[in-house]
Image: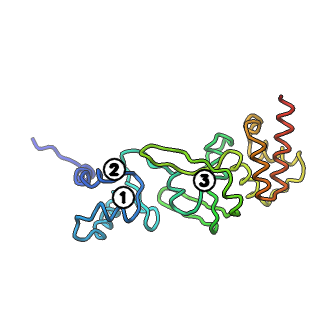
Amino acid sequence: MLKTISIQELQQRMMDPIQNRFPQETFDYQTLLDILKDYSRPRNKISDLIRKKIIVRIKKGLYVLGDGYARRPYSKELLANLIYGPSYISLDFALQYHGIIPERVEAVTSVTTGRSRRFSTPLGLFIYRTIPLSAFQLGMDRVDIENDTSFLIATPEKAMCDKIREDRGIQLRSLKDMQYYLYEHLRISETSLIAMNPVNIKKIADRYRSGKIRLLKKLIDRITMRNS
């Protein structure tokens, strides 16, 4: 008795020789051309792979393997670094990543020295906010992930300072204002604040020349002293 297979299973079997050539789930246009170099019309093959959802176009020149074809989950953090640069993850998404704010953040937020941009992609929204080069150069970490890849993300202190600077419409003129903003607006715990390094916050405040960020340091110093 002949076994019936679905169209998706047939596509998977046809894709296997190509799929195994991808070193990662995320790849650029040149990598794709190299993988398809044996085809007489590789650009037509790319269009066919996109149409069949075997690969997904994130933006011009950047792709991921589609659902059912990827060997492992793709990294939104890595994609954020690749979509627009120079950039690294910060603001709300980084605060969530570090466990500082309780809310789930859907859009991946980053800081950049380029223009502020928004990219609506098949894999979600990616937002980039401009900051000065002097502040950009301070407070980023590299996180290694599987398959010899890594992404850049702000430290907890830098993500917090970037967020305070970005919320320009909120008046923060006193320690009481800062407490309300952190505890009620962002719902940050005192434990998370105590874990931050006030020396690093001062360095970031100096780069931004920000009184609001200096106010954050003053509050953390007071809380730490009270709990010591």
Residue at x 46% of width, y 48% of height: 149
Residue 223: x, y in percent?
Answer: 84, 36
Identify the element where label 1 is drawn.
Answer: strand
Identify the element where label 3 is drawn.
Answer: strand
Q: Which mark is residue 55?
A: 1
Mark before the other along the chain sequence, 1 or 2 = 1
**How far apart are the two marked residues, 1 and 3, measured between alpha carbons?**
25 Å
Q: In screen coordinates, is 227 left or right of 30? A: right
Q: Which mark is residue 83?
A: none
| Residue identifier under label 3 | 89
Residue 226: x, y in percent?
Answer: 87, 31
Mark before the other along the chain sequence, 1 or 3 = 1
Callout in the foreground (1, 3): 3
Residue at x 24% of width, y 52% of height: 17
Mark before the other along the chain sequence, 2 or 3 = 2
**How far apart are the two marked residues, 1 and 2, measured between alpha carbons?**
8 Å
Residue at x 85% of width, y 49% of height: 215
Report if residue 190 is visible in the image: yes
Is residue 152 or residue 51 the one in the foreground? 152
Q: Which quadrant of the structure image shows residue 53?
A: bottom left
Rate crowding at label 1 as few (under 14), some (14 to 19) or many (20 or more) other CA atoms within 10 Å: many
| Residue identifier under label 2 | 69
> Of the residues shown, which amino acid type is indicated by label 3?
Ile
Q: Which quadrant of the structure image shows residue 131?
A: bottom right
Residue at x 60% of width, y 53% of height: 89
Identify the element where label 2 is drawn.
Answer: loop
Rate crowding at label 3 as few (under 14), some (14 to 19) or many (20 or more) other CA atoms within 10 Å: many
